[in-house]
Image: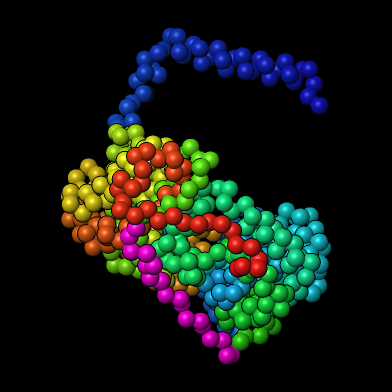
Amino acid sequence: MISDKHRIRNFYRIGLIVIAILFVLVYHPSAIAATAKHYTELEFPPLKQVQIPKYDRYEMPNGMVVYLMPDRDLPLVGGTAIIRTGDRWEPPARVGLANLTGVVLRTGGTQKHSADELNQLLEQRAAAVEVGISDAFGSASFSALSEDLEMVFGLFAEVLQQPIFAQEKLDLAKTQIRGGIARRNDDPNGIVGREFQKLVYGSDSPYARTVEYATLDNISRQDLVDFYRQYFHPNNLILGIVGDFDSQNMRSLIQKYFGKWKSQPNLSQPQIPTASQSKLGGLYFVDRPQLTQSYVQVGHLGGRFNSPDYPTLDVMNQVLNGFGGRLFNSVRSRQGLAYSVYGVWSPRFDYPGLFVAGGQTRSAATVPFLRAIRTEIEKLQTDIVQPDELQRAKESVLNSFVFNFENPSQTLSRLMRYEYFGYPADFLFRYQRGVQITTAADVQRVAKKYLQPEKLVTLVVGNGTAIQPPLSAIASEVIPIDITIPDAKSG
């Protein structure tokens, strides 16, 4: 407890500080005024050159690739394993299998520890082990205080190598997913994002399909075991560790816990599913009478990060998007047509991503909003970018570049992803150089080449009665989309 004497002393100190501040404000106001500048007059030192921290990369006899990046700033150690797998390779009749495998791999316990024991051991040490599988890769991670490293790392290795996929944990995960299916139409943002993906990629595409009750019911514990056995091998995995450790000791620890994990000599890499645009143009509508505003997405199939034009496309992004971008300035600020508005060229590593523009607007402004978005997209092709626009866009990209390397963990993760997807380790620096040399003519060139107004797919989720003028004012046909959730029997 704090004594009365300490309280009095603290109040006295605070009083002296307040008196000193008032003295400066009353008797030396010019000292304060002299330091105030308009934000346009502020000068900042140039950003420091980004440096990649030192790291080691080596390959174990069982084929597992390892990255080590010591960082002694804090007594913490974290690691991530990237597994060459993904939900794009799960059978169409069992959509949801990859996600369930990742979830129950972690929650189902191991051959040495039950799920509850595993959780208790980690919680007692403020440590974590997590697993997940996305569309193009799986990941498993751990974090721990450096003093608890060996114990936590041993549990991490257990989860990866000795999962038991407990049936009761699978049943629990299925119940949670069923709850998500039942609620998925409650969020209009979720509807517009999900259905737009289906329109562009196709509803059966591995990049757009969704888990349903029927596909969930088709998944058994043995399916999880088989999926795990197909992909989880040391020669199908990249492990990266960053934090407070000695590299030689860390190598010994990795050998201790992963050295006996046998490789799969007959491992074959599945072919990456292709992606093409399913709907070429068209206006699609999901009627939600309870809504007071419209949720809109407009776009088409995009590209990949390894396109030689990616740096220029990212500059184009900045011209169109964000605070100070054309969409914000025109559609939101000058015309007042949107609560939010955006336009993004969003590539992927090994399959085409999306170009998507959109936002939220009041129901009565839906048609003008759509027209305004399309106008700004077309202007990128016809109107040369002005010098101030180009400078703002390039500075925005280049100034944010350093945030790709905020900490060693982020840097290591990027290096691992580049190796996983077959990109050069200096890819981001090549991108930086590409941004630096981008000209206004380059921006117009890529806008003409990659933006395709005739292929723009338009999706509106909103209140059909309240949208006035109606969507038929800008399209000869408005195609309704049925988002009814199929039951287990109908699939």
147 vs 287, left or right, is right
Q: Look at the image and tell me in which quarter the N terminus lies.
A: top right
356 vs 21, left or right, is left
Residue 275 position (above or below residue 42): below
Q: Position of residue 95 (x, y in %)?
A: 59, 70
Indicate whether residue 170 is drawn in magenta: no
132 vs 389, left or right, is right
Confirm whether residue 66 shows in the render.
no
Residue under the image location 27 percent in, 57 percent down: 453
Residue under the image location 54 percent in, 59 percent down: 409
Where residue 89 sits, quadrant-wise, is: bottom right
Question: What residue span does the magenta drawing correspond to?
Answer: 265-282
Q: Residue furthest top?
A: 27
Give 249 or 171, whichever is nearer the viewer. 171
Q: Look at the image and tell me in which quarter the C terminus lies.
A: bottom right
Give 81 or 16, whichever is nearer the viewer. 81
Q: Position of residue 307 (x, y in %)?
A: 32, 68
Residue under the image location 30 percent in, 48 percent down: 474
Q: Residue furthest bottom?
A: 266
Give 374 or 446, whichever is nearer the viewer. 374
Residue under the image location 40 percent in, 13 percent down: 29
Indicate whether residue 279 is drawn in magenta: yes
Q: How many marks?
A: 0
Q: Main secondary structure of the magenta part?
A: loop
